[in-house]
Image (cartoon, helix red, strand yellow):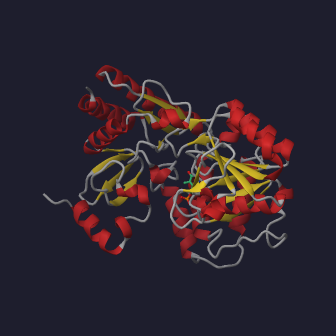
Amino acid sequence: MTSNNDTLFARAQRSTPGGVNSPVRAFRSVGGTPRFITRAEGPYFWDADGKRYIDYIGSWGPAIVGHAHPEVIRAVQEAAARGLSFGAPTEGEIEMAEAICRLVPSVEQVRLVSSGTEAAMSALRLARGATRRDKVIKFEGCYHGHADSMLVKAGSGLLTFGNPTSAGVPEDFAKHTLVLDYNDPQQLEDVFAKMGDSIACVIVEPVAGNMNLLRATPEFLQAMRRLCSQHGALLIFDEVMSGFRVALGGAQSLYGITPDLTVLGKVIGGGLPVAAFGGRADIMKHLAPLGPVYQAGTLSGNPVAVAAGMTTLALIQEPGFYDRLAAQTRKLADGLTQQAKEAGVAFCADSVGGMFGLYFAAEVPQDYAQMMACDKARFNAFFHAMLDAGVYLAPSAFEAGFVSARHDDAVIAETIRAAAGAFGKVAG
Ligand SMILES: *Cc1c(COP(=O)(O)O)cnc(C)c1O
């Protein structure tokens, strides 16, 4: 029986490379046919065959208040009726900048852009322009969007600069990026001792969510902060995923560490394209039109997108929002762990705020190598069993999952019941 999803996927592949507009949507990692989504509401979305799923990707993070929240939709409709885009400033952009500066105290000034990739790319350029240095440090397994200097993997030795991970990235660009191991403060120490004075910045996901969920150790982030300050390098926290997701003030509020620059996205757009980068005012003043670092955008601070973002930011500031979100996410993680145990499957789960990780391993991974050692085949089987049962997890063993404020006890309980069956299928 051919499903509408199959028909649409076949058709999509004729006009679009791989049939998708962002690679992970293609189900290449887990196999099978991607689901084409027709609508979403609260914790659910529906595919082209009318099948309902409990959604644990939430558009990869933005849908933190649940899909199609009535207040967000109303704000978007009202903004749209006033005009879609002006190419001239609006008061809404000031309100959004003020809200970000208030909620993330390390951000004294901020610039709005349209995607996380653009925000991270701009923050890197700003760091290089402000320090007049070229070299940047990133960590294996962290994702910072698809700008050239970030699509880089480690070179052959500790002090050799990186190699491109994508065709089309010149080696001459990649050689300015040094890729180190996440959660290895000693390695960072060694590199700074050798070449600290040529490093423009260190960029990191302070809670990593693009190699499954991986928590940074406090020692790792503290070492990074100290070394950057000692050597005049800037510390950039890429909180595109963790910002307004692990806590209202982002991962920096959980760890009590103040980065020089912060990159935001996902939740701040509430489902429309808003991202941002900001930080110390003395660094931000290097940006055009004040300074020599160029950056611009036709749709930056778009009034309709800002309306969705501002309404979402208002909703997440309601008292107790993050306590409830974290409790529901923890309930999910604990419930899944319990079902796996009963089925005799080596599995564990972790969560930080509204973000979770599922690991087919005996213990929660502490670094990239341990993460890569998780049982991918078993995850794929589990993913499909859950999908059949109406639960949509990220279609990759190496992505974090997301819970919304609309994942109530009944939704979590339904998920855990589905998991009991799914673990049974993948056991043995
Ligand atoms: C999603 C993500 C990005 C890229 O954002 P886009 O809006 O997809 O370009 C960058 N950094 C992190 C940490 C992300 O999770």
Left-right relation of 16 to 121:
left
The residue located at (57%, 69%) in the rendering is 304
**Quadrant of residue 284 within the rendered picture:** bottom right
Q: Is residue 169 above or below residue 341?
A: below
Residue 107 position in % (x across, y down): 76, 51
Relative depth, front residue between 196 and 18: 196
The residue located at (80%, 46%) in the rendering is 196
Residue 208 position in % (x across, y down): 58, 42
The residue located at (81%, 73%) in the rendering is 289
Whether residue 311 is visible, yes or no, is no
Left-right relation of 421 to 180:
left
Residue 241 position in % (x across, y down): 57, 48
Which quarter of the frame holds ligand 1?
bottom right
Left-right relation of 345 to 222:
left
Whether residue 426 is visible, yes or no, is yes
**Quadrant of residue 88 within the rendered picture:** bottom right
Looking at the rendered image, the quarter that the C terminus falls into is top left
The residue located at (53%, 58%) in the rendering is 72
Looking at the rendered image, the quarter that the N terminus falls into is bottom left
Number of marks? 0
Residue, far left: 1
Residue 383 position in % (x across, y down): 33, 42
Q: Is residue 102 above or below residue 91?
A: above
Q: Is residue 53 above or below residue 362?
A: below
Left-right relation of 217 to 387:
right
